[in-house]
Image (cartoon, rainbow, N blue to C red):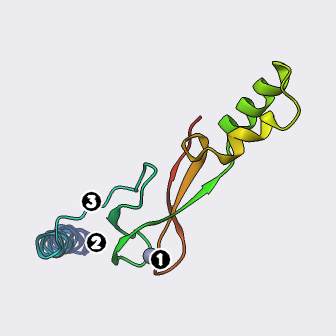
Amino acid sequence: MPTFKNTENHELAPRMYREEEQHSKISIQQSQPIPIVAPSGKQPMPCMCPYCHHSIVSRVEKSNGLVVWLASAGICLLGCAVGCCLIPFFIDDLKDTTHYCPNCNRVIGRDKKL
Ligand SMILES: [Zn+2]
């Protein structure tokens, strides 16, 4: 009796796996060529949100990362402490970029400088 049950389970498991595989293939074929990878870079980019599974264009927000603080500290060390050290805080290229989903407002990608 126990051997019969085992063979039944072995037959069921691969069949269920195959059905899941077919479903995933169909959903990929129907969707447009939008990258599923996490967005990166400084600009908003079209992608598929991994949380709400909508095709969206990411919303980006800049934040002062390690590079900004290091640049500021470096300028201070060079002797330009009278306001010059604030310059890195106004340069977007030095800042970290965080990509948000505009639909569910979750973080879907980060572009850190360091
Ligand atoms: Zn989302």
Residue that numbered label 1 is attached to = 102
Quadrant of picture, ligand 1: bottom left
The response on whether ligand 1 sits within 8 Å of label 1 is: yes
Q: Earlier in the sequence, mark 1 or mark 3?
A: 3
Residue 64 in the image, given as x and y percentages of width and height:
69, 48
Q: Residue at x 88, y 34 (%)?
A: 82
Picture layout, residue 56 above or below residue 65:
below
Residue that numbered label 3 is attached to = 35
Residue that numbered label 2 is attached to = 2
Residue 85 in the image, given as x and y percentages of width and height:
79, 34
Mark 3 surroundings within 10 Å by alpha-carbon count, few (fewer than 14), some (14 through 19), many (20 or more): few
Type of amino acid under label 1 = Pro
Spatial separation of the CA atoms under disc 3 and disc 2: 48 Å
The disc label shown at residue 29, or none = none
Q: Is residue 47 left or right of residue 20?
A: right
Q: Residue at x 69, y 39 (%)?
A: 88
Q: Quadrant of the N terminus?
A: bottom left
Q: Is residue 46 left or right of residue 64?
A: left
Q: Earlier in the sequence, mark 3 or mark 2?
A: 2
Type of amino acid under label 2 = Pro
| In this view, the mark in front (3 or 2) | 3
The response on whether ligand 1 sits within 8 Å of label 2 is: no
